[in-house]
Image (cartoon, rainbow, N blue to C red):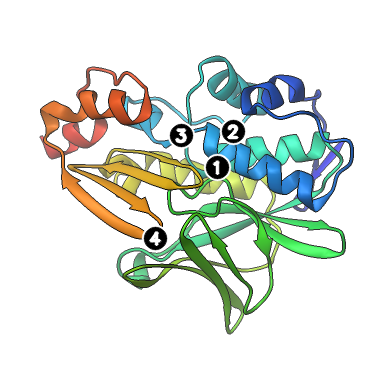
């Protein structure tokens, strides 16, 4: 029996050994902040952030067995709800409790912001941490203290948490300046809260994950984003961008992310038609 947010779910153990093998890390001997930090970074550098399932007309299941089949057996990636659900399941197997929180990505006009991003709150060694393996290339590589004014330099980008009334806002600073990424509150979410957010994000015609195509990856020295008709790189906090024509998408996906794209058409292309 496991606690997730405010709810309790009974389920079989996840395939922790297979997960750790996929990450290339050994099972931690103790549930420490350092162990979670290493696991967080390994997850970020192993799995792609992408929306190919959505763009090929598939549905997004958050059942851990389905995530294991997708991430471990098919060696695919996913988006925030998938990444953080799988990561939280691994933490539970290691005896670490993670609260589920939902946030609003600060992209576009504020009246369209909604709770479509999932993050985790983890308490270890008497410190509360923000863990998030699912924000794509410019997201956290490692957990950071979940406190007003906390900062963390990771992979050339500086992250900062600040309080705005009842909200915490995570921002990211690169060589060009500071950008808000998302806001969230501290109220724990149930699995069904997450299911509702996942359903909206994966099926609503106005969702950015249906209106556009993306593949992203992150490592300690480089972050790469293929989104729409552009390939963006961050190296040591400096961003560069180059155009990518539609007929080159498959070539770029293979060269930069080592994956073979489906032939399409994709959902975003059908919407344009």
Q: Which residue is mark 1?
A: 81
Residue 33: where, in percent of width, then height? 79, 52
Residues packed near mark 2 inside 10 Å, few (<14), some (14 to 19) or many (20 plus): some
- Kindly check if marks 3 and 1 are in contact, taking CB atoms under 8 A apart as contact: no
Mark closer to the chain start, 4 or 3: 3
Residue 186: where, in percent of width, then height? 68, 67
Of the two numbered discs 2 and 3 in the rendering, the one whose residue sits closer to the viewer: 3
**For this rendering, which residue is in front, 206 or 29?**
29
Residues packed near mark 4 inside 10 Å, few (<14), some (14 to 19) or many (20 plus): many
Mark closer to the chain start, 2 or 3: 3
Residues packed near mark 1 inside 10 Å, few (<14), some (14 to 19) or many (20 plus): many
Q: Which residue is mark 2?
A: 62
Instruction: Label 2, secondary structure: give it.
Output: loop
Alpha carbon of mark 4 to alpha carbon of mark 3: how far?
20 Å
Mark closer to the chain start, 3 or 1: 3
**For this rendering, which residue is in front, 53 or 201?**
53
Alpha carbon of mark 3 to alpha carbon of mark 1: how far?
13 Å
């Amino acid at each position: 029996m496991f606690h997730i947010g405010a709810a309790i779910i009974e389920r079989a153990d996840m395939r922790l050994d297979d997960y750790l093998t996929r990450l290339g890390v050994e099972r931690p001997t103790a549930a420490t902040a350092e162990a979670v930090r290493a696991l967080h970074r390994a997850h970020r550098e192993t799995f792609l952030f992408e929306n190919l399932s959505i763009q090929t007309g598939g549905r997004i299941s958050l059942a851990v067995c389905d995530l294991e089949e997708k991430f471990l057996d098919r060696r695919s990636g996913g988006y925030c709800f998938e990444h953080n659900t799988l990561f939280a399941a691994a933490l539970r197997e290691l005896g670490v409790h993670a609260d589920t929180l939902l946030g609003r990505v600060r992209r576009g006009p504020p009246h369209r912001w909604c709770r479509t991003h999932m993050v985790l709150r983890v308490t270890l060694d008497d410190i509360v941490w923000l863990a998030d393996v699912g924000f794509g290339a410019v997201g956290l590589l490692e957990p950071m203290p979940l406190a007003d004014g906390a900062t963390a330099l990771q992979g050339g980008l500086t992250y900062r948490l600040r309080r705005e009334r009842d909200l915490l806002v995570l921002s990211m600073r690169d060589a060009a300046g500071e950008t808000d990424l998302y806001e969230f509150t501290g109220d724990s979410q149930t699995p069904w809260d997450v299911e509702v957010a996942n359903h909206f994000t994966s099926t609503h015609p106005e969702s950015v994950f249906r209106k556009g195509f993306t593949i992203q990856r992150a490592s300690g020295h480089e972050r790469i984003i293929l989104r729409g008709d552009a390939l963006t790189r961050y190296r040591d906090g400096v961003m560069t961008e180059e155009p990518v024509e539609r007929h080159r998408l498959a070539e770029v996906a293979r060269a930069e992310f080592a994956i073979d794209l489906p032939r399409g058409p994709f959902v975003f292309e059908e919407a344009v038609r």
